[in-house]
Image (tube, rainbow, N blue to C red):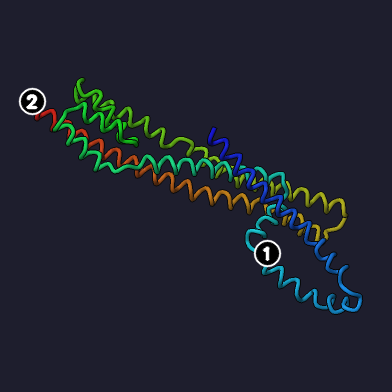
Amino acid sequence: MKKVFVLMVIALLMGFSVVNAQDNKKDAPKAGTEVAEAAPVDSVAPVVAETPEVAPAEEAEVKGFHQALKEKFIEGGPGFMAFILLCLVLGLALAIERIIYLSLASTNNQKLLQEVEAALERKGVDAAKEICKNTPGPVASIFFQGLDRYGEGLDVVEKSIVSYGSVVMGRLEKNVSWISLFIALAPMLGFLGTVVGMVQAFDAIEKAGDISPQIVAAGIKVALLTTVFGLIVAMILQVFYNYLVSKIDTIVNDMEDSSITFMDILVKFQAKQK
């Protein structure tokens, strides 16, 4: 339920940004009209003469990267741009959820091993199980599974650690494949929009009966915008994907090293009991 709520909020924010860009474009000519009407008759000529020099400079200062990006997004057409935006929103939502989950899964394994070893020497297996139960993270849960089967022998403990480790790895890698899907899907949607836009451009040329530079340039610009935004979305999600893969590999390596050390601790504890 929380994931759905987050996705809805992000989608609403992006939709509000697009609507705001459209409103800004609509309001611009109205403001100019009001200034022209309010000006006195005698001052019309100077204003008209100065307008071409001042307006471009003001536009360059006011229009930033974010505003230009929104305008280009609207020019690309809502059909394919909406799907590309959806890929970005869903991909970022999944990436943020995985980052939070993996951050919570990262623990101080050396400290946990020291506490488990001290608990085994002082109070036995039950005390070590209690420490693992109260410690968050996948490593502590793996240790708990091993300690829970300590009475069945070290071979059973090792098998349970390996089996439960595979389950934990599956949880760590959950939804990462969906992010890779959106990385591949966003450029493909952009290329599809480009092809459709080129077809529409050639249709316009056929209807006009003449290869006008304006018709060709406008059609090609709109067609290529979908590819640009598709590639931008793919690059953004690729950065998050590589970070997640690196984070998962680090956690898995720590789990394997800690599991080996944990088995050594159990072997020493069993030797002392004998």
- Name the quadrant of the C terminus: top left
Q: Residues within 10 Å of mark 2 (few under 14, many from 20)?
A: few
In the picture provided, is 54 more to the left or to the right than 167?
A: right
- Rendered residue at 41%/33% (across/down): 171
The quarter of the displayed image where residue 32 is located: bottom right
In the picture provided, is 14 more to the left or to the right than 215?
A: left
Q: Is residue 215 placed above or below 179 in the rendered structure?
A: below
Q: Nearer the viewer, residue 198 or 18?
A: 18
Please provide percent x and percent y for residue 23: 75, 54
In the picture provided, is 248 more to the left or to the right than 213?
A: left
- Rendered residue at 67%/55% (across/down): 70
The quarter of the displayed image where residue 117 is located: top left
Please provide percent x and percent y for residue 196: 73, 46
Element at label 1: loop
Mark 2, residue position: 274
- Name the quadrant of the N terminus: top right
Please provide percent x and percent y for residue 219: 76, 54
In the picture provided, is 108 more to the left or to the right than 170?
A: left
The quarter of the displayed image where residue 75 is located: bottom right
- The amino acid type, in three-letter code, at marker 1 is Lys
- The amino acid type, in three-letter code, at marker 2 is Lys
Q: Is residue 35 placed above or below 176 in the rendered structure?
A: below
Q: Earlier in the sequence, mark 2 or mark 1?
A: 1
Q: Residue furthest top?
A: 152
Q: Is residue 76 placed above or below 45 in the rendered structure?
A: above
Q: Nearer the viewer, residue 227 or 131?
A: 131
Tell me how far mark 2 sits from mark 1, CA to CA. Answer: 78 Å
- Rendered residue at 73%/55% (across/down): 220
- Rendered residue at 76%/48% (across/down): 199
- Mark drawn on residue 63: 1
Element at label 2: loop
